[in-house]
Image (cartoon, grey):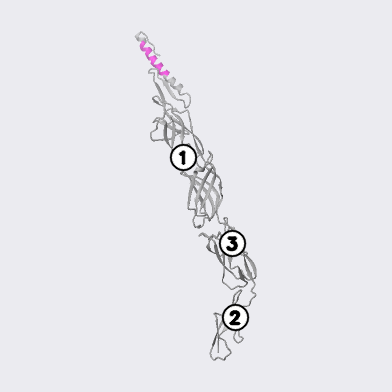
């Protein structure tokens, strides 16, 4: 307060004292206002009646500023992102927002994008801010005035608990799988679903609109498979990627399986023990697969009895062929013919029997060119041998009781 005195000498002295009192009162009020950490700083200037606020741009040194209004915050959009998301822009909603208003993310100021409006502002959130799962408090600050409200931002960690179905046949042209887990939709930037394994997947699309409930527990992926099938069969990791570095994997969760083959007919159905070679066995059925163009990989194989052949020829998805060996038909027997497809999936087909019958009929040999006359020149005889069952393996002959010779071709020359 100011004091007046009529005596001139005293007036000068008291005036000085009064000024010092005002200054001390101002300083005392300023210190009192700064008492609590984070409290707004200010004092009433008793000389001029104006209010001065202490402020700082980054919670640092004090600076005298003009009158300020406390901003309010009502929410942020988006309010959720997944770990590994890219840098993104976030809109902060509220009131009393001015050019100098700053959004504070868990105590860290964010860069403002563009010019704030009264009720909203846009800020940039670096990817480093969403590297850890949890919740973050977002506030607004204008100078030293801090919003009393707090908006909450959530950083999630997506998980894949299971995949259904767990396999599809390699004969399919597409596969649709459903992921079950947590945080599988909201907060994901440009999600991509992939199968990573031994096969060749041509394309992937995602239908992320099928999330159920508020916890985003499901996601559906539709995969295009090669047509015709080259070799997609295999065990795959299911990989969900998003944002800059976001990724979650369910290892060995999905398989593209070879089908289980079936055998409908074989040809021939009957052969005779000891039949002449070569003799080709043809197997007709379904679900036959070629050997993939991969080192060491195998396709469908015909099994003759207990012998799994290694020289099966893939003709089509419905036909295979293989040469019969002499050992396969050495003796009369009933031999089961099956087809085996490799894993994953695959398996052994039903059996169709090949009958190996005993040869009970002797071959018939005819010779033309022979007669009862005397000849002074060589005589050429033509030999024909037939057998209705196992066929003719070999024809032998001798002349004048010499050692038997094997007939090569169909003629024998008898010297004069």
Residue 13 covered by magenta stretch:
yes
Q: Is residue 40 in view?
A: yes
As drawn, the residue found furthest toward the top would be 6
Q: CA distance from mark 3 to mark 1?
A: 60 Å
Q: Earlier in the sequence, mark 3 or mark 1?
A: 1
Q: Identify the residue at image location x=61%, y=79%.
A: 364
Range of magenta residues: 11-25
Q: Which mark is residue 128?
A: 1
Q: Nearer the viewer, residue 67 or 254?
A: 254
> Which quadrant holds residue 405?
bottom right
Residue at disc 3, secondary structure:
strand
Q: Is residue 4 left or right of residue 156?
A: left
Q: CA distance from mark 3 to mark 2?
A: 39 Å
Look at discs 3 and 1 and give the one toward the viewer.
Answer: 3
Say which residue label 3 marks: 263
Q: Is residue 202 left or right of residue 165?
A: left
| Residue 48 position (above or below residue 112) | above
Q: Earlier in the sequence, mark 3 or mark 2?
A: 3
Packing grade of label 3 (10 A; few <14, some 14-19, many >=20) is: many
Circles 3 and 1 in contact, beta carbons < 8 Å: no
Q: Position of residue 266 (x, y in %)?
A: 58, 65
Residue at disc 2, secondary structure:
strand
Say which residue label 2 marks: 365
As drawn, the residue found furthest toward the left would be 8
């Amino acid at each position: 307060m100011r004091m007046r005195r009529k005596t001139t000498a005293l007036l000068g002295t008291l005036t000085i004292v009064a000024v010092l009192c005002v200054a001390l009162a101002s300083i005392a009020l300023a210190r009192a206002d700064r008492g609590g950490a984070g409290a707004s700083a200010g004092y009433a200037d008793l000389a001029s009646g104006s209010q001065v606020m202490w402020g700082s741009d980054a919670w640092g040194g004090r600076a005298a500023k003009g009158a300020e209004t406390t901003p309010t915050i009502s929410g942020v959009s988006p309010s959720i992102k997944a770990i590994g998301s890219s840098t993104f822009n976030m809109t902060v909603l509220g009131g009393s927002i001015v050019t100098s208003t700053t959004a504070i993310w868990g105590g860290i100021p964010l860069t403002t994008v563009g010019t704030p409006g009264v009720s909203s502002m846009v800020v940039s959130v670096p990817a480093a801010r969403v590297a850890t799962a949890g919740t973050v408090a977002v506030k607004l600050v204008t100078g030293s005035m801090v919003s009393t409200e707090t908006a909450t931002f959530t950083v999630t960690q997506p998980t894949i608990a299971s995949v259904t179905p767990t396999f599809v046949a390699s004969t399919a042209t597409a596969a649709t799988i459903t992921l079950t887990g947590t945080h599988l939709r909201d907060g994901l930037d440009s999600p991509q679903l992939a199968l990573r394994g031994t096969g060749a997947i041509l394309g992937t699309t995602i239908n992320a609109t099928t999330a159920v409930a508020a916890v985003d527990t499901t996601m559906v992926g539709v995969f295009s498979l090669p047509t015709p099938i080259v070799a997609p069969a295999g065990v795959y990791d299911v990989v969900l990627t998003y944002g800059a570095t976001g990724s979650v994997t369910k290892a060995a969760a999905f398989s593209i399986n070879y089908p289980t083959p079936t055998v409908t007919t074989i040809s021939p159905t009957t052969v005779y023990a000891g039949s002449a070679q070569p003799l080709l066995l043809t197997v007709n059925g379904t679900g036959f697969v070629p050997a993939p163009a991969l080192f060491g990989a195998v396709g469908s194989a015909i099994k003759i009895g207990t012998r799994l052949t290694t020289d099966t020829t893939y003709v089509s998805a419905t036909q295979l062929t293989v040469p019969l060996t002499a050992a396969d038909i050495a003796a009369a027997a009933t031999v089961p013919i099956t087809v085996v497809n490799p894993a994953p999936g695959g398996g052994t087909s039903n059996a169709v029997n090949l009958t190996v019958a005993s040869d009970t009929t002797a071959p018939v040999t005819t010779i033309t060119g022979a007669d009862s006359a005397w000849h002074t020149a060589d005589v050429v005889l033509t030999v024909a041998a037939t057998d209705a069952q196992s066929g003719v393996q070999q024809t032998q002959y001798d002349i004048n009781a010499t050692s038997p010779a094997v007939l090569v071709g169909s003629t024998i020359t008898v010297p004069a």
